[in-house]
Image (cartoon, grey):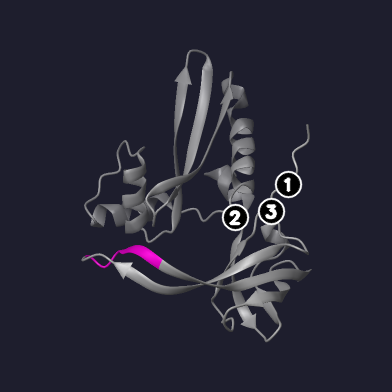
Amino acid sequence: RTEFFNTGRFTIVDRKNMEKILKEQAFQKTGCTTTDCAVEIGRLLNMNSMVNGRFDKVGSMFMIQINLVNVEKGEITLMDKVECNSENKLSESARVLALNFSSKIPVIGKIVRSGENEVIVDLGTVDNVIKGMKFTVNRLKEEIKDTSGNVIMRDWEDVGEIELTEVQKQASKANVLNKKTSFKEGDVVSMIFEETEQLE
């Protein structure tokens, strides 16, 4: 939890608040290591995604394994693990795991001001974005809820692409590369991963 918080990429839910919500929903999380369990908790806490994992010791080896679970789709979208052979190395191993894991998760933000050919997004150097990065722009069309009022699915619309031209600490300017309709404040931007050539 500490190392995830230190990356600046995750929202850490206070344990007491989480347990209070789950208790109100009469949900028992003891031994919750499965994807189905993570999805159920994520829906109760109104999350899009959440991280769960496990800690094991086999012989003299310690292993931390973590998963990123897409709550809407009910599936694991990213897995990673780290191993070490000493309790003294656990803290450093957790730090390395959190950094590696966070670097594989797409950067997601929102448009906070929209113009004809330029927008401002709420992503900056604190989010590890740089000039030239490209993002897709999506708009939430509909939230589908179950009979208890929990959101179980979201329907998104692809509305275009942008490229960052000026990056400050907490926000950036971006040029509109293409758009299917006018962008709006609140539209979600997601970083586009471009394949890089593998070195032999």
Query: What kind of residue is marked 3?
Result: Glu
Residue 146 is situated, as x and y percent measured from the top left of the image, at 25, 64
Image quadrant where residue 56 sits: top left
Q: CA distance from mark 3 to mark 2?
A: 12 Å
Q: Residue at x 52, y 14 (%)?
A: 60
Q: Which residue has dot 3 on it?
A: 194
Which label was assigned to residue 51?
none
- The earlier-in-sequence mark between 1 and 2 is 2
Q: Which residue has dot 2 on it?
A: 106
Image quadrant where residue 114 sits: bottom right
**Closer to the camera in the image, 76 or 109:** 76
Instruction: Describe the element under mark 2 as helix, strand or loop.
Output: loop
Labels 1, 2: front one: 1
Q: Which residue has dot 1 on it?
A: 196
Query: What kind of residue is marked 2?
Result: Pro
Marks 1 and 2: CB-CB under 8 Å? no
Q: Residue at x 37, y 50 (%)?
A: 74
Please state the total of marks drawn on the protein image: 3
Residue 20 is situated, as x and y percent measured from the top left of the image, at 31, 55
Magenta-drawn segment: 148-154
Marks 3 and 1: CB-CB under 8 Å? yes
